[in-house]
Image: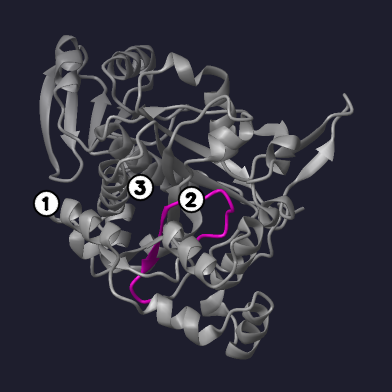
Amino acid sequence: MRSLPGFRDFFPSDCARRNYITGTWRRVARSFGFLEYDGPTLESLDLYRKKNSGGEILGQLFSFTDKGEREVALRPEMTPTLARMLIAKGREFRKPIKWFSIAPFFRYEKQQSGRLREFLQLNCDLIGDGSPAADAEMLALLIETMRAFGLTAADIVVRVSDRRAWMEFLAGKGLADEMQAREALSVIDKMERASRELLEAKLGAFGLKLAEVEEFIAMGKPGFYEKLRENLASRGLEDFCELDLRIVRGLAYYTGLVFEVFDRRQERRAIAGGGRFDRLLSDLSDKKVDLPAIGFGIGDVVLGDLLEDLPATRSRMEAAIAAQQACEIFVIVADESRRPEALGIVQTLRAAGRTVDYPLVADKVGRQFKDADASGAAVAVVVGNEWPSVKVKDLKERTEVAMSQESLADWAANLQTPAP
């Protein structure tokens, strides 16, 4: 029996890889002063039916009627949940609110490279500040998250655009109706994946010509981008960003700055994306709560594939995984009559915060040392006929010292080994 299509089993090495990714996400988000939150995996279907949630998402939902006759759905994204939570209790928190979450999401999508039906995603959001400085701070957080994996400006690019510029352009072409403008933007969002003939036909339905859309995309840099670039330049991060007005983002609730991260080789879909959603809280709360907001999400699937593909990031990830999975200390029971004492040492070493393994049943000493090597342990503690002294063997340097069992706790507390 296999797992369902688009869903993954996580064996120990897969869990270690996942922990490396999520641990890096968490560390960088906290370094920017963001606080972690979470919400329910199951939400009311009505949350995604709201006007600005976007039709594409509705078609990808895992939804059903529960035993209480409620229409519910597995969450496909975090932003509506965040909005619901802030509508309920947002007044209780100091502004700006800087929150992040790391959680599983579910979308019934066609399986293809970099796209599964269950995936993990980092979501970072800054609520209550609509300034350009907040935009720059979020882009800096996004870039620093990528850098934490060893990715450089030669590996990835953040393509930046602005929905406001597009709405002004479309209004100037006679598309003043917001719903029509959004439908036109959904066509523009897929420009790189559609033929010119198809684009001409679809844009023509809105009274637009492909040539004039392409001319708008090729225009000079808008003022918003220059200010953004100046802010990032002061941090030494400007080389990661490029203006690209082809980026409009598919979700309907975006209102201003939008951005996506791609690998420079353009071999995969977007690694991350986000933007401003200044009206979402107001729309979902019937105008009871009105706070500007900006956020982004990074999925683990495309990011993980990219980290595997690049030699430098792959070796970095493999080293972190090896450190996670390694046992720090292996206790060798050289004299079976001393097993009770060996168990006491195991307990002492674990209480000192070390990862410790030992043979559960009697075995030859040579076999135990092979198991110690296989476990990745840096050190073996040999309990034998020298008791109450033990031998401490460095398994890499092949050296050993004698030590009293009373001093093991202090020794273990100061042992320099890679943290698991």
Which is more foreground, mark 1 or mark 2? Answer: 2
Disc 2 from disc 3: Cα separation: 40 Å
Please give the range of residues in magenta.
249-265
| Residue designated by label 2 | 255
Disc number placed over residue 216 in the picture, else none: none
| Residue designated by label 1 | 234
> Closer to the N terminus: mark 2 or mark 3?
2
Number of labels in the image equals 3
User: Does 67 appear in magenta?
Assistant: no
Q: Amino acid at mark 2?
A: Thr
Q: Say above or below: 194 vs 33.
A: below
Q: Say above or below: 197 vs 401.
A: below
> Closer to the N terminus: mark 3 or mark 1?
1
Which is more foreground, mark 2 or mark 3? Answer: 2
Answer left or right for 233 relative to 1: left
Q: Residue at x 36, y 79 (%)?
A: 218
Disc 3 from disc 1: Cα separation: 34 Å
Q: For mark 3, give the secondary structure.
A: helix
| Residue designated by label 3 | 321
Report the front residue among 408 and 353.
Answer: 353
Task: Evaluate if marks 3 and 1 touch, with contact meaning CB atoms under 8 Å apart.
Answer: no
Q: Could you say where residue 117 lies in the image, as x and y percent from the top left?
A: 65, 54
Residue 307 visible in rendering: yes
The 10 Å Cα crowd at callout 3, few under 14, some 14 to 19, many 20 or more, is many
Residue 375 visible in rendering: no
Q: Residue at x 33, y 31 (%)?
A: 34
Q: How is the image coloured?
A: one colour
The 10 Å Cα crowd at callout 1, few under 14, some 14 to 19, many 20 or more, is few
Answer left or right for 338 relative to 104: left
Image quarter where the C terminus lies is top left
